[in-house]
Amino acid sequence: MTLTDIVVGTLNSMPDWQDEGIILGNKPYAELHSITTILTKSRGRYAGLVKAGQSSKKRSMLQPGSLVDSQWRARLDEQLGTFKLELLKNYSALIIDAPLRLSALSSICAILESSLPEREPQPTLWQATTAFLQILSLSENDIEWLNFFISWELGLLKELGFALKLETCGVSGSTQELAYVSPKSGRAISKPAAGVYADRLLVLPMCLGGHVKIDKELTAGIRITGHFLQKNIYNPIDKQLPSARKRLANMVEMLNW
């Protein structure tokens, strides 16, 4: 066996793949490079080195939320590996003049980056996230896409094993007069069953299946999903909700919706 055969055999055995991905985050590495994390269509959350990732040419492509064609390669499968990325769609550029939408985009990327296990396929979350990015960029109604954002967070909780049960009352089993959510169990609670404990419960808005009309429904929805993200995902690892998610909640709180 010649040296050329050995080199070619080594290169051919190097683990590599090509897939679509959504940029989730970047961290500077050395002087010019960056460590980039993406959610891939087929392989879940992956990280890799992007050479010259801090250059002005690549910085715009590496914005969170950008859809890219990604090529990953490493000498060994367990190594960090390197990315070659080609921009397919820059969603942040499409909503650059909409601070609330930009905040939502930053929020979903930060949540995915900090909550998903590495290298585990997430086909349902991939479909939900790409669909939400399209809705975010195309919808002319802020209330419409915010409803989809709340649904996206509920879907994330479900995929990670923490689905909320909002269809029936957790006390009586009734489907009538659902008005609250237990902050401990994530079960809906009807108005009669809540009784004197109503002030200890989260208000269930109609956008999540509640039967009692309230003011600031979207604020209530964002508060519910935020509570269970913190309780089930971030408390066990002694972390707080990403700052981008807190910022979005504050912005929605200030609106009259």
Image (tube, rainbow, N blue to C red):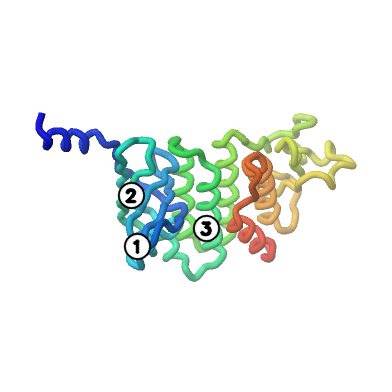
In the image, is residue 42 above or below residue 255? above
- Disc with the residue nearer the chain's start (2 vs 1): 1
Distance from disc 2 to disc 3, alpha carbons, whole Å, reads 22 Å
Amino acid under label 2?
A: Phe
Q: Indicate the quadrant where residue 55 lies.
A: bottom left
**Most distant residue in the bottom direction:** 97
Distance from disc 2 to disc 1, alpha carbons, whole Å, reads 12 Å
Image location (x, y in percent) of residue 179: 76, 44
Q: Is residue 16 left or right of residue 250?
A: left
Check disc 3 and report its element: helix, strand or loop: helix
The foreground one among 22 and 84 is 84
Q: Name the residue carrying label 1.
A: 58
Q: Name the residue carrying label 2.
A: 83
The foreground one among 4 and 88 is 4
In the image, is residue 251 above or below residue 107? below
| Residue 177 visible to the viewer | yes
- Disc with the residue nearer the chain's start (1 vs 3): 1
Amino acid under label 3?
A: Ser
Q: Residue at x 48, y 45 (%)?
A: 128
Q: Are marks 2 and 3 in contact (CB under 8 Å)?
A: no
